[in-house]
Amino acid sequence: MAKKPIGIEVSLAVAEAVKLCDADVVAAYPITPQTHIVEHLSELVANGELDAAYIPVESEHSAMSSCIGSSAAGARTFTATSSQGLALMNEMIYIAPVLRTPIVLAIANRALSAPINIWNDHSDIMSVRDAGWIAVFAENGQEALDLTIMAFKIGERPDVRLPVSLNIDGFTLSHFIEPIIIPDHEEVQAFLPPNEATVKLDVANPISIGLLANPETYTEIRKATDDILLASKDKVIEVFKEFGKAFGRHYRVIETYRHEDAEIVLVTMGSISETAMTAIDEMREAGEKVGLIRIRLWRPFPVEELKAALVSAKVVAVVDRHMVMGAPNGPVCLEIKSALYDALNPPKVFNFIMGLGGRDVRRVDFKTVVERSKSLVKGGQSSFEIVGVYE
């Protein structure tokens, strides 16, 4: 009999997924809007529902430091953060992938200061986009739970051994109560093998991890990490397929919606994708040939899959939720343009920034993007616009 979904806050569902995965160590420091994740994990540990070391650290920097140490010792490790917390982790974020420590980090995406803002956009994750982490985006609560489980399996694979960030939009996803199917512990254990670290800190067999790299070796170490990250895309795809077979919910590195005959294709990441799909349905009813590409795997970037999905479009409208200061495009658009650079007869690519600092992204905004894209094609105007900015 198929399981019935239960109503649960998405943050709590992520914590429940960590429990189902039998995490060994949880490093916790509160910051809005991720706090409910680690709060619920503290309850699960205190109640004996999760047998884990719960470390209430003094800062996010300490949280990631603790995670690197515990993961290097072979422990299944989890933490969560947002915004300025991720910024404070920054020093250690760049260390984790090179040391091959498969930490799972949930990021309730939130705007970076200044000015101070506690609401959602993607500026926090984009601040560490080049750090070497595998990064996935969830569109809804079910995906957040499922991707948490998959993140442990992906990162801990012997042929990967990299940290994974799960990105959920702050408040608009993290604090919503949604119907979510929570699998049984036995099902998750059958899907997720034990964390078997082949190289780890062990007092009985002392080794050193994270030594100084001289100029003669630094470049080679960085290249080796990048090679592993790029190769991990195929491993992510394999885990997605394995999850689909085990649980009946299927995932891909990119998802398409009504794009086969679309002349204008929108590109989105995160929870606004569901709003975009509703807007596309309405535009289709009005005769507009509009489709959607949703990016689930942000790093490593799915170049081949996106190129194949976009090359037949006439116009691509990329929606970014982060501004690259001093450059004429957002980060997702820059990647799309790079992917399409050597394509024959590439589509026109336009960039639209919206939803910064938690500003509502509405169906009408996507309709505005489509209309502006038509005008830009005809007028040859700038390819970069901020939607709804007050003049």
Image (spheres, rainbow, N blue to C red):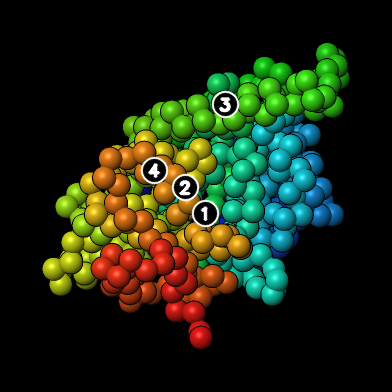
The structure residue drawn at horizontal position 44% and vertical position 44%, both measured from the top left corner, is 338
Please give the label number shown on residue 335. 2
Give yes or no for contact between labels 4 and 2 (Cβ–Cβ under 8 Å).
no
Measured Cα–Cα span from mark 2 to mark 3: 20 Å
Q: Tell me if mark 3 has few (under 14), some (14-19) or many (20+) residues whose alpha carbon lies within 10 angstroms of its own.
A: some
**Farthest residue in the top direction?**
205
Mark closer to the chain start, 1 or 4: 1
Please give the label number shown on residue 341. 4
Give yes or no for contact between labels 2 and 1 (Cβ–Cβ under 8 Å).
yes
Determine which quarter of the picture holds residue 72. top right
Mark closer to the chain start, 1 or 3: 3
Mark closer to the chain start, 3 or 4: 3
- Type of the residue with mark 2: Glu
Mark closer to the chain start, 4 or 2: 2
Q: Tell me if mark 2 has few (under 14), some (14-19) or many (20+) residues whose alpha carbon lies within 10 angstroms of its own.
A: some
- Type of the residue with mark 3: Ile
In the picture provided, is 28 more to the left or to the right than 103? right
Measured Cα–Cα span from mark 1 to mark 4: 15 Å
Q: Give the residue at mark 3.
A: 228
The structure residue drawn at horizontal position 44% and vertical position 70%, both measured from the top left corner, is 385
Q: Look at the numbered disc 3 and give the secondary structure of its residue.
A: helix
Q: Give the residue at mark 1.
A: 331
Does the rendering let one see residue 38? no
In the picture provided, is 91 more to the left or to the right than 377? right
Q: Look at the numbered disc 1 and give the secondary structure of its residue.
A: helix
Mark closer to the chain start, 2 or 3: 3
